[in-house]
Amino acid sequence: MDTRLITERLRERHNITTLNDMQRLMASSTADRVILLAPTGSGKTAAFALRLLRSLGTSDGRTVQAVVIAPSRELVIQIADVIRPVAAGLKTVAFYGGHNMAEEVKSLSPLPDIIVATPGRLLDHLLRRNLDLANCGALVLDEYDKSLELGFYDEMKRIVGKMKRLKLIILTSATRLAEMPDFLDMGRKPEIADFTRQGGRSRLQTVMVPSPAKDKLDTLDELLRSLPDGKAVVFVNHRESAERVFRHLKEEGFPVGLYHGGLEQRERKLAVDLLDNGTTPVLVSTDLGSRGLDIDSVNYVIHYHLPPTAESWTHRNGRTARQGADGTAYIIVNEEESIPEYVSWNREYHPRAVSEDGIRSEVATIYINAGRKERISKGDVAGYVMQKGELAKEEVGKIIVDDHSSIVAVPRAKAGKVLELLAPHKLKNTRVRVSLLK
């Protein structure tokens, strides 16, 4: 693909009007072995997409040109959502556990040009002989160190063993240059682009919040009630704790979502989407949410539990202060806790609740039971809610289109009326059901 076309589409589809240093490097790099090190939120996905897409030719429907492997479902979805709108004329699909296998198999005809997948699901397709990667020319292992930590070595080795004609290999990590997997031919001098010392973390403030009680729920309440409206991710160390904190905040009237590994994939994705669009601007999460999530403008990270490792501390904080924006990480600590040496703060804060409501949401989300597979686009949804729902352009919030559903953020005060206006009308000549997500 032509570099100019890629950058134009990054601007049009992702509002990336100016490439950062890392993206400019990848837009001009000619290296066929690249190791890209950059913190979360630095634009790393767009950067490796620039190098990857430049290496691809036109689609012929018979060859998988590129494979991107990522360690989590969420990261796979995020990467596909970045690449798909930019890869003009190329078919991009996402494969991951929990996704409908029959639909994935159906998407292999005609053969996609780009597959973004978790290691286990991609190997499953290969073992079923649903596809052949022998002629694939490009491979990206995104967050390769995390994939190795999670035990995906064998799966990745078997996948790479079936890729006989690799010309381009890109490895990425958000933290460090880890040991190279021995099943890859990285050559003698791969290009190492290290941007780990750059990015938004210089705008991060870290604040210690003393809790007078061992149980920190009251302190968390006061903190959330004292903060200006914005998006907050509350990190805990266990699923059971996440459920407990979530139930408490919900009972207290906070607009809150829940994210942990015990939830179904669709539940986790919806929790992230509703945080992202502002419907539930507070998210209680385990460390599963500390990597691989692309959420716009998180204002606050709250360590309800102290992070168990230095890496956890780094990745949790990486949810905020992204791409030059300001952000604050609050660490709630009681007197009995021993603070690890990797946890530090700039100042202390003793919250005094200044609002009965705390962080509020002015946004509601309308659900539509049609999506990409029904040939519905973001533009279709925007036109529908503006024309039939009588909303001005500036009142239409974030739109997310999935395989068989779409959601759109609208002003909460108008949500009921918009729903009433939309109900009798078709979307793009398709009869749809619309509802309000609670």
Image (spheres, grey):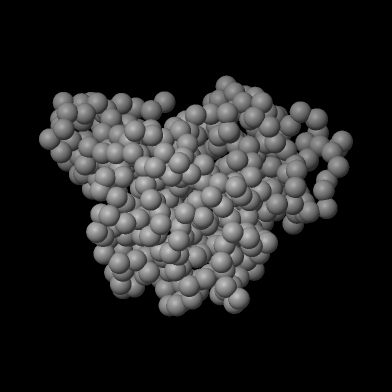
Q: Quadrant of residue 247?
A: top right
In the image, what residue occupies the spot 31% across and 51% down?
Answer: 112
Give the answer, above or below, for where 420 lies relative to 189.
above
Q: Nearer the viewer, residue 280 or 211?
A: 280
| Label total for image | 0
Expressed as whole percent of the image width and height from the top left, the position of residue 334 reads 81, 37
Q: Nearer the viewer, residue 34 or 265?
A: 34
Expressed as whole percent of the image width and height from the top left, the position of residue 199 reads 58, 65
Quadrant (top left/top right/bottom left/bottom right) for the N terminus: bottom left
In the image, what residue occupies the spot 41% across and 39% down?
Answer: 128
Q: Quadrant of residue 302?
A: top right
In the image, what residue occupies the spot 30% across and 42% down?
Answer: 107
Expressed as whole percent of the image width and height from the top left, the position of residue 33 reads 52, 71
Q: Residue furthest left?
A: 429
Q: Can residue 30 be seen by looking at this rendering?
A: yes
Give the answer, above or below, for where 430 lies relative to 203.
above
